[in-house]
Image: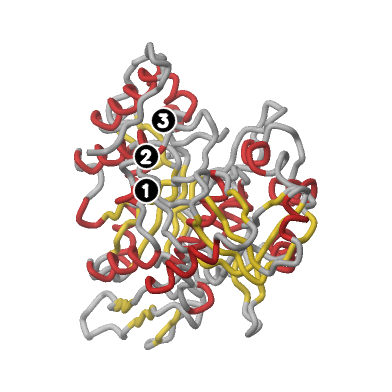
């Protein structure tokens, strides 16, 4: 897999045509409330003044689609759920209910019907009623098996229940259609090789039918794991950004511990946005909190590590919002990174930091990466429905031996740099060895060492979770 320390920041450039003496340029979207004015030089001045005005980017489709029933309807919906056919949700299904309910997939209003499923598989986008196109690159679907289909019969709605049979939601105006698993896997991952983590977990052994419809969520999804306070919805994030007077929001998606290479990119991004004329760019540090493969560091430990990064001053708490993104992880490379970007637009982010080989993984049966490491950032710059996301290529970050810290790679002196891969980082932590000084803050590194130390199974056979204080 590509090195964790090889990262890029992507902000989509503005039109590069020459500017007249006075020009007002808007980003290429009708929904992004940002304008830049380049004013004429004053007499004797050597520069032109840049003025940026901004509001939060609008969600896809123009509004955030939350799918919760009103409080005064909850009891009625719970009673209704007892009278209609039931579908028990898996853990990953429940994570998708969470994603849909809060509007991360806006304007989607439930599990996909067949037309939406096919558009997603073949076009990585959805065409709305007004003819506009929004990005949607991964299917958000609910599978049922051959025994469940006849039990649903002619019913137009079903109840969705958790593992304890508690009603979570009602899916109405349903449509049942064939679950072509091979096509779904091939088009999402570009391969049907065995060993794709999400496919093995959620598709291969799933039912042969998909059921779509409009979702009415009775109870918000809570995990009661000590981390629910970090799970801010898009609406709550937008409220927080407004409260902080953010005039730009730049998001960083990750499923690994934060090292100083990541921090360099994030702090340098903010500096660049300030240089562009923004007054208060805010970072959304947004670790993925849904399903991840077995060898990834668990969410509870990652959150503890992220808190240490803020405590140690690597990132500024005043300009950083840490929140959990509830989506499951597909490891589907350039296809999935579009979903990660689209969801952050709905949360209010108009700038997106993307790493090398984003959402990628090693090939499950061959000794190579599954995806080209540069394709993710290239695809984001061309993806349908993502024109509003601002992208600008960035340099590679690596450990500079001459400075004793993470720095942008200088190709004129390659021997001065070390690339520390995720595998190397995990090996060092597992062996309780220290990385070079300046690679990661001491508090954050200790959390990582403690996690691998915890994998030495205790007498009760249970590996403890690490919940941030």
- Residue at horizontal 29 percent and vertical 66 percent from the top: 241
Front residue (pair 63, 223):
223
SS for dot 3 = strand
Q: Position of residue 97 (x, y in %)?
A: 52, 57
- Residue at horizontal 46 percent and vertical 67 percent from the top: 346
Q: CA distance from mark 2 to mark 1?
A: 6 Å
In this view, the residue farthest toward the bottom is 22
Q: CA distance from mark 2 to mark 3?
A: 12 Å
Tag 3 or tag 2, which sits nearer the N-term?
A: 2
- Quarter of the figure with the C terminus: top left
Q: Position of residue 275 (x, y in %)?
A: 29, 65
Front residue (pair 226, 192):
226
Report the residue marked by disc 2. 261
Q: Are marks 2 and 1 in contact (CB under 8 Å)?
A: yes
Q: Is residue 437 visible?
A: yes
Front residue (pair 453, 319):
453
Query: Which is more foreground, mark 1 or mark 3?
Result: 1
Q: Which mark is residue 154?
A: none
- Residue at horizontal 65 percent and vertical 56 percent from the top: 141
Q: CA distance from mark 1 to mark 3?
A: 17 Å
Q: Residues within 10 Å of mark 3 (few under 14, many from 20)?
A: many
Report the residue marked by disc 3. 417
Q: Residues within 10 Å of mark 1 (few under 14, many from 20)?
A: many
Front residue (pair 39, 166):
166
Q: Is residue 12 visible?
A: no
Report the residue marked by disc 1. 265
- Quarter of the figure with the N terminus: top right
- Snapshot quadrant of residue 195: top right
């Amino acid at each position: 897999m590509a090195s964790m320390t090889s990262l890029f920041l992507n902000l989509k450039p503005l039109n590069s045509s020459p500017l007249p003496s006075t020009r007002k340029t808007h980003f290429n979207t009708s929904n992004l409330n940002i304008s830049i004015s380049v004013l004429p030089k004053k007499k004797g001045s050597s520069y032109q003044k840049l003025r940026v005005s901004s509001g939060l980017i609008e969600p896809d489709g123009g509004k955030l689609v939350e799918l919760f029933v009103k409080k005064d309807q909850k009891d009625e919906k719970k009673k209704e759920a007892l009278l209609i056919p039931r579908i028990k949700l898996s853990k990953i299904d429940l994570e998708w209910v969470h994603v849909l309910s809060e509007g991360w997939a806006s304007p989607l209003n439930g599990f996909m019907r067949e037309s939406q499923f096919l558009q997603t598989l073949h076009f990585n986008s959805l065409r709305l009623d007004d003819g506009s196109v929004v990005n949607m690159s991964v299917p958000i679907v609910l599978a049922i098996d051959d025994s469940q289909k006849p039990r649903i019969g002619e019913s137009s709605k079903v109840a969705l229940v958790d593992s304890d049979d508690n009603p979570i939601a009602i899916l109405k105006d349903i449509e049942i259609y064939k679950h072509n698993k091979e096509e779904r896997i091939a088009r999402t991952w570009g391969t049907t090789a065995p060993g794709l983590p999400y496919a093995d977990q959620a598709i291969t052994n799933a039912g042969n039918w998909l059921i779509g419809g409009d979702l009415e969520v009775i109870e918000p999804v809570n995990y009661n794991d000590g981390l629910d306070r970090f799970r801010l919805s898009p609406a709550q994030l937008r409220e927080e950004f407004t409260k902080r007077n953010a005039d730009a929001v730049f998001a960083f998606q990750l499923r690994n511990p934060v090292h100083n290479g990541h921090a360099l990119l994030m702090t340098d991004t903010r500096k660049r946005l300030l240089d562009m004329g923004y007054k208060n760019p805010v970072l959304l540090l947004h670790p993925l909190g849904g399903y991840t493969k077995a060898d990834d560091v668990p969410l509870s430990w990652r959150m503890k590590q992220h808190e240490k990064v803020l405590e140690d001053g690597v990132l500024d708490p005043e300009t950083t919002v840490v929140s959990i993104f509830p989506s499951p992880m597909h490891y589907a490379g350039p296809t999935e990174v579009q979903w990660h970007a689209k969801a952050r637009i709905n949360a209010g982010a108009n700038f997106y930091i993307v790493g090398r080989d984003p959402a990628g993984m090693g090939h499950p049966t061959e000794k190579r990466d599954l995806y080209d490491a540069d394709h993710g950032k290239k695809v984001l710059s061309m993806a349908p429905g993502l024109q509003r996301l601002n992208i600008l290529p960035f340099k590679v970050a690596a450990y500079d031996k001459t400075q004793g810290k993470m720095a942008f790679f200088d190709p004129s002196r390659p021997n001065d740099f070390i690339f520390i891969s995720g595998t190397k980082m995990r090996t060092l932590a597992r062996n309780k060895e220290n990385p070079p000084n300046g690679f990661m803050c001491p508090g954050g590194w200790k959390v990582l060492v403690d996690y691998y130390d915890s994998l030495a199974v205790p007498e009760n056979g249970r590996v403890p979770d690490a919940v941030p204080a």
